[in-house]
Amino acid sequence: MNVEALRFPGREFDPSTGVARFHYALGDLVLTETVDFGPPSVVHPALDRVLDLLYVAASTSYYKIAAPTRVELGFPLAEKALPWVTALFREGLGEFAYQNTLPYVLDLEILPGPYAEPPADVHEPAGAPLAAVGGGKDSIVSMEALQRAGLDPVLFAVNPNPIIRAVCAVSPQPTRFVRRTLDPRMRELNANGAYNGHIPVTAINSLIAVAASLMHGLGPVVMSNEASASVPNLNWLGRDINHQWSKGLPAEAHLRDALLAHAGLQEAYFSLLRGLSELHIAALFAKFTAYDAVVTSCNQAFKQRDATDRWCGHCPKCRFVFLAMAPFTGRERLLGIFGTDIFADSTQLPGYRELMGLTAHKPFECVGEIEESLVALRLLAQQDEWKDTLIVSALVAEAALPSDAEVEATFRGDGPNLVPPVYLAALEGLGAAR
Ligand SMILES: CC(=O)N[C@H]1[C@@H](OP(=O)(O)OP(=O)(O)OC[C@H]2O[C@@H](n3ccc(=O)[nH]c3=O)[C@H](O)[C@@H]2O)O[C@H](CO)[C@@H](O)[C@@H]1O[C@H](C)C(=O)N[C@@H](C)C(=O)N[C@@H](CCC(=O)O)C(=O)O
Ligand SMILES: Nc1ncnc2c1ncn2[C@@H]1O[C@H](COP(=O)(O)OP(=O)(O)OP(=O)(O)O)[C@@H](O)[C@H]1O
């Protein structure tokens, strides 16, 4: 499809039903995304401005269909929200640009509309936190930290699948779910050769969560994005390409700035686990056995069609999470969680060699840093029940294992973060990782 720009012909929100519709134009083709929040219980003055930001974030799914050389916003946004918009497209679509060899996307032209007036007031959401749940180990650690600290979180998900629902059901905390529907013509366009690829989906889920929190008088949105989400997969044409860009710290900081500049919201959004490595989170997760029958981090389970029931057992994320949990759960418990022994399967070796940095780049998936994989390997090499397994023994023969100091640094948990002190204390309340 050859069009010159993505345009924003308008959006609607019905405050009685809580249904928002976002329209996007690629030439004559107008596509619509629907977000059904359910009826709001509170009228919050910042909501309309948050929906503006969501209108921009959700546009990335539609931009990618034709990848035009320009984005024309055409509607008012605060000038200080524009750095977020620029980063959302140029960095959030970095993997898409790389996979489709579209280098201009990394410097995409973004034409702002008129600047919006600054918000009349600044609000700091002060109610119970809204904890975003993805069904994996990370959000479970946050759910437990918030609940144990008496912060009484409301558990939140966009399009919860049976896994997310089952994880939430283990917790006594209340839930709030939102349904998001892509334009149904997306699949047809894909089948007819439209561009396809990864989009910054966490930015979309995050803004849906902020809007939902305002609609019900709740407190800040608490994400569970970890330190390693900020680490790029590779460098292309001198630019960092990060599959997890919208889960990273720069994206979090940009979005907080945009929320303040455009909607007057302060401390409305942060990631509780930002300062922690994946291994540290896995060690904390291992303290809670109640979720073992439901926890699932594999992305194959989150597809809209042909989703797996739980762990697929042969993707980079399954490999990484098996590796990250193994030092802390013991063998019997881990095989129970995954339903398969990944370390006994020789076909997994090439995938593990990638995770250890022995070949290619870190996979385009939500996996930890190479250093973290090596630390996990070193811990496993010291454990009798793991050290002689096919995968561990093969990798130990090839990899350079990290030093004591590197192992210690992995569990310090003091990485850069934007977590308010009361929430940091909640996390510390879970105790030491090991
Ligand atoms: C579940 C998954 O991994 N999906 C990625 C996959 O899409 P696939 O076609 O296999 O399945 P669907 O997700 O059902 O997508 C159908 C089509 O719809 C498009 N689409 C989907 C969601 C959306 O928000 N916008 C969309 O336009 C999609 O492009 C398909 O055409 O491959 C796609 C192409 O690479 C990916 O775009 C799909 O990724 C989803 C957006 C997704 O939800 N992925 C998360 C599980 C994910 O990767 N999370 C990252 C977070 C990264 C971030 O920066 O936010 C992570 O955990 O690291
Ligand atoms: N469907 C969703 N609705 C709302 N928030 C989500 C959803 N999926 C993910 N999130 C949020 O984004 C964060 C990152 O997603 P991710 O899938 O990496 O995490 P996870 O499922 O908690 O753990 P894991 O990394 O083990 O899969 C989650 O911790 C959660 O805060």
Image (tube, helix red, strand yellow):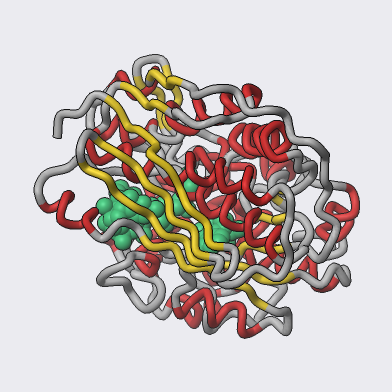
Q: Position of residue 310 (x, y in %)?
A: 40, 75
Residue 73 visible in the current orientation: yes
| Depth order, front residue of 399/18 | 18
Judge whether 206 appears above or below 78 on screen: below
- Please report the residue visible at 32 percent of the width from the left and 37 percent of the height from the top: 63
| Depth order, front residue of 102/180 | 180
- Please report the residue visible at 34 percent of the width from the left and 52 percent of the height from the top: 32
Looking at the rendering, in which quadrant would you find the N terminus?
A: top left
Which residue of the protein is positioned furthest toward the left in this rendering?
A: 192
Q: Position of residue 66 (x, y in %)?
A: 22, 35
| Depth order, front residue of 51/246 | 51
Looking at the rendering, in which quadrant would you find the C terminus?
A: bottom right
Residue 380 visible in the current orientation: no
Which residue of the protein is positioned furthest toward the top in this rendering?
A: 238
Q: Position of residue 203 (x, y in %)?
A: 53, 45
Of the four image quadrants, the one with ligand 2 is bottom right
Could you tell whether 275 is left or right of 208 in the image? right
Q: Quadrant of residue 340?
A: bottom left
Q: Position of residue 35 (x, y in %)?
A: 47, 61
- Count the marks: how many? 0
- Please report the residue visible at 22 percent of the width from the left and 33 percent of the height from the top: 27
Q: Quadrant of residue 301?
A: bottom left
Judge whether 412 appears above or below 136 on screen: above
- Please report the residue visible at 15 percent of the width from the left and 56 percent of the height from the top: 188
Could you tell whether 232 is left or right of 303 in the image? right
